[in-house]
Image (cartoon, rainbow, N blue to C red):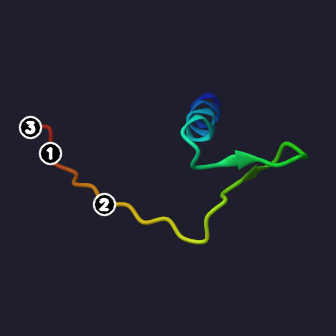
């Protein structure tokens, strides 16, 4: 639970999610696209 709270707080800081007037988390976008590569550490 602690990590979820930390992640949500960071997403708020960078503007990907917001809190509404009731304190609920909202995503102010109709679509989010990402592009990233995952590679093995070994």
Q: Is residue 35 above or below residue 4?
A: below
Residue 12, quarter of the rendered image: top right
Q: Which mark is residue 42?
A: 3
Q: Which mark is residue 16?
A: none
Q: Give the residue at x 60% y 37%.
A: 4
Q: Secondary structure at mark 3?
A: loop
Find disc 2 in the rendering and name its residue: 35
Of mark 2 and mark 1, the one earlier in the sequence is 2
Q: On the rendered image, what quadrant is the N terminus found in?
A: top right
Proximity of marks 2 and 1: CB atoms separated by less than 8 Å: no
User: How dense is the environment of label 1, judged by Cα within 10 Å: few (below 14), some, or many (20 and up)?
Assistant: few
Locate residue 12 relative to residue 25 in the image: left or right.
left
Find disc 1 in the rendering and name its residue: 40
What is the spatial separation of the Cα atoms under label 3 and label 2, in whole angstroms? 22 Å
Q: Residue pushed farthest bottom?
A: 30
- x and y percentages locating residue 22 in the rendered image: 90, 46
User: How dense is the environment of label 2, judged by Cα within 10 Å: few (below 14), some, or many (20 and up)?
Assistant: few
Q: Is residue 34 above or below residue 21?
A: below
- x and y percentages locating residue 26 in the rendered image: 72, 55
Q: Secondary structure at mark 1?
A: loop
Proximity of marks 3 and 1: CB atoms separated by less than 8 Å: yes
């Amino acid at each position: 639970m602690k990590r979820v709270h930390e992640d949500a707080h960071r997403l708020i800081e960078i503007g990907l999610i917001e809190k509404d007037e009731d304190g609920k988390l909202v995503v102010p976008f109709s679509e989010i696209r990402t592009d990233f590569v995952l590679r093995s550490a070994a």
